[in-house]
Amino acid sequence: MAAKGAMKKKATSNSNKTNSRKKQKKEIELPNPKIQEKVVDDDISGSDVDSDVDDDMLVEQHRDDSDDSASDALSDGDQPFTDDFLQDDNKSSDSDSDSDHSDIERKSKAIDAKKEKEEKEAEAELVDNIKEQADEVTLPTPQELKEEAQGPPDLPRLQRRIKEVVRVLSNFKTLRQEGASRKDYVKQLTMDLASYYGYNDYLIEVLVEMFPAVELVELIEAFEKPRPMCLRTNTLKARRRDLAGILLNRGVNLDPLSKWSKVGLVVYDSQVPIGATPEYMAGFYMLQSASSFLPVMALAPQEKERIVDMAAAPGGKTTYVAALMKNSGVIFANEIKEKRLKSLTANLSRMGVTNTVVCNYDGRELPKVLGQNSADRVLLDAPCSGTGVISKDESVKTSKSLEDIQSCCHLQKELILAAIDMVDANSKSGGYIVYSTCSIMVAENEAVIDYALKKRDVKLVPCGLDFGRPGFINYREQRFHPSLEKTRRFYPHVHNMDGFFVAKFKKMSNSKAAPAPTTEQPEGGDEVIEPIDSVIKKKAEDKVVHHRIHESSTKEKVHRENGIAQHGKAENTFSGKKRKERKRFSREEISKSREEKRAALRTAAKGKPFSKEKKFAKEARTTK
Amino acid sequence: MRPLDEKETTQVFEKLFNFTGNNLKNIVEAPSHEGPESNPGRYCFRLNKNRVYYVSESLVKRATNVKRDKLVSLGTQIGKFTKGGAFHLTIQSLNLLAANAKHKVWLKPTAEMSFMYGNHVLKGGLGRITENINTNDGVVVFSMSDMPLGFGVAVKSTQDCRKMDPNGIVVIHRADIGEYLRMEDEL
């Protein structure tokens, strides 16, 4: 497992190289000033003789193995001295005006020479110092590990080692210890992170597999800090500007949330309890994390629509939906847990929402109760493991196991099919399903979406959110439908909100068992067997294909990067297990890919949409 | 979920009339804007698990396929019948009452918090008051910025209020929006 993790990292580290280098630089910058001081001190005490020789040798020794860092250090080291030079110049020019030249010139030259020497020494020492640091953290031997396991964890040491291993992993070729493989480093990092931050083995391993080392540490650090407190203006009762004014008067320090939200406010600090002001009780705003705005914005409910919120409590999203609909239409707010119903109804009435019917079913029964194809839009904020909100709930770190995740995603798959069944594909304004979780696990997100794409006649559409990272198309040994790049992932260390996932479907037809149309469209000879009603479907499908091609050309760049990196990796690690996975490309899919290729040729000879098609065909060929 | 019977209807309407006076007609006859149809019809009163809801007919129609024991709420709850058979307005009805209120009082900012912790309105906290309030009329309580805070029952008429001492009770507390926090479970 860890080996695969390493592979993954190799593939992705390219894209993150710039990032990691920055980080490296930061780390190196930190010790600088102290070192400078030291150098100067030493000089004053007068230990010139031996340092000269030593330093020269050291410079030569280390120039090759820590090229990068040394040059960084140099550029930084220059800074204070240039300042000094300037000062000196000033001094000399001042004195120029009133005393003789030669003497001062000589003096200044002497000073210059001295400075230069100091500088050289400083450089050398700096390099030396860095080297020492690097040497300090070598991978511990098994025996050392055993000893460490017996005593209580030495936190500063763990932290230092984490930092160091991450640095090594980010520039593995040059920094690694002789004879140590990437796998060893990753294994050590996994262990250290688990014990330093208190994660259980399963969760930390999954995280290590998902992220390159530098990003992983950033993510885990971000999980340690709370996210900023956000509130959403209830547009049924107040305007954001007015609300902000009132709250400012109460001594609340706040700002508009971000340019993507017109109703969000972020609270920095407050003299009054923000959840107990008269305005809160009057329903002017709702305390809500920034991430929970996203699924509702993706859902984009229209007035006079029929909306179903399958897991509604405590009502943050439901009230947002109602506010967007201006209390028109009808919302079915469902919640399975009786305990949470109280807060749901209280919030709904506090916010002045009148268009909701609150019911207490298991989400899976809802299509039977409310009727199939009876809703315009469905919001499914699925119950999940909560791995995106560790900053809110620390217990997730230790309480989740593989079984939990599996049971979660089983439930999620059932729920998403129920959600799709409830939506009416022929709805004039709607026909959309939004799926969201506060988990960052692939099994609970992309895998569920992929499952839905196979089971029902739906396709993914853009979420309408212009930020967030695209969902995974390839994740380790899994290959998902290429349209999964339209889903969005949000991370605490990147977007400063809880870890979150949003996907938006459009339902294409009301037929239940229709995996074929969205992903593969039988062509040519198969047409004879097709039932009549599918002709209509096909027309719609043709549109979809064209649509997709257009989109692919816009997003192509990103896709290509992803695709190539992942593709190469996939070929490298071609194993028996993988072959099984690959069999999923059925005959229909191959014909579909060819058809797409043909369509692309026909529509535009611009050359742009090709690469995707080629990749498709290539993948198809490998399955043969 | 069922419509109110005759006795229940009179109880509910009496209570509402106490607060809204002739505006009760508005409440009953207003066209609703909830519901997906272009003409969702009017509002009606429905009883579910001893609670009375004021809800668009269109929503009622759609809620019929939800089982009785699974239906938690719909539209706006306005009150509940106690075990003894009496009808109480609850805080959720505030929006409806505030929009149609006949008698209003406005509180000074200093008195807001006290009222929202469930205390009665004292003369000292009174900012403004509408004319023609009689003893035992239902009164909706607002903040000075016209934000509804709750409702209660007048103890003194407007006339008598003028010559009261500052510590005298003007409005007896019935419900306030602080209940959303204080007693979320009992609403």
Image (tube, coloured by chain):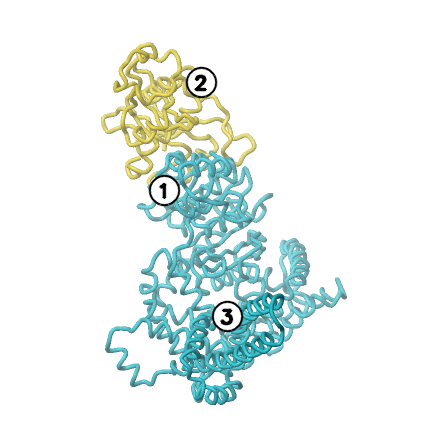
Chain colours: A cyan, B yellow
Report the residue marked by disc 2. B25
Q: Secondary structure at mark 2?
A: helix
Q: Are marks 2 and 3 in contact (CB under 8 Å)?
A: no
Report the residue marked by disc 1. A271
Report the residue marked by disc 3. A475
The mark found on residue A54 in the picture is none
Q: Secondary structure at mark 1?
A: loop
User: Eyeballing the image, is A41 above or below B5?
Assistant: below
Q: Are marks 1 and 2 in contact (CB under 8 Å)?
A: no
Residue A573 seen from this side: no
Three-letter code for the amino acid on which mark 2 is drawn: Lys
Residue appearing at x 29%, y 28% in the figure: B81
* CA–CA distance in space, label 1 to label 2: 44 Å
Say which quarter of the image contains residue A106: bottom right
Q: Nearer the viewer, residue A34 or A365?
A: A34
Residue appearing at x 63%, y 73% in the figure: A101
Residue A216 screen position, x and y as percent = 44, 68
Tags 1 and 2 on a common chain: no
Residue A25 screen position, x and y as percent = 50, 71
Residue A614 screen position, x and y as percent = 67, 72
Task: Count numbered badges in the picture.
Answer: 3
Residue A183 seen from this side: yes
The chain carrying label 3 is A
Three-letter code for the amino acid on which mark 3 is drawn: Tyr
Q: Secondary structure at mark 3?
A: strand
The chain carrying label 1 is A
- Between circles 2 and 3, the one closer to the viewer is 3
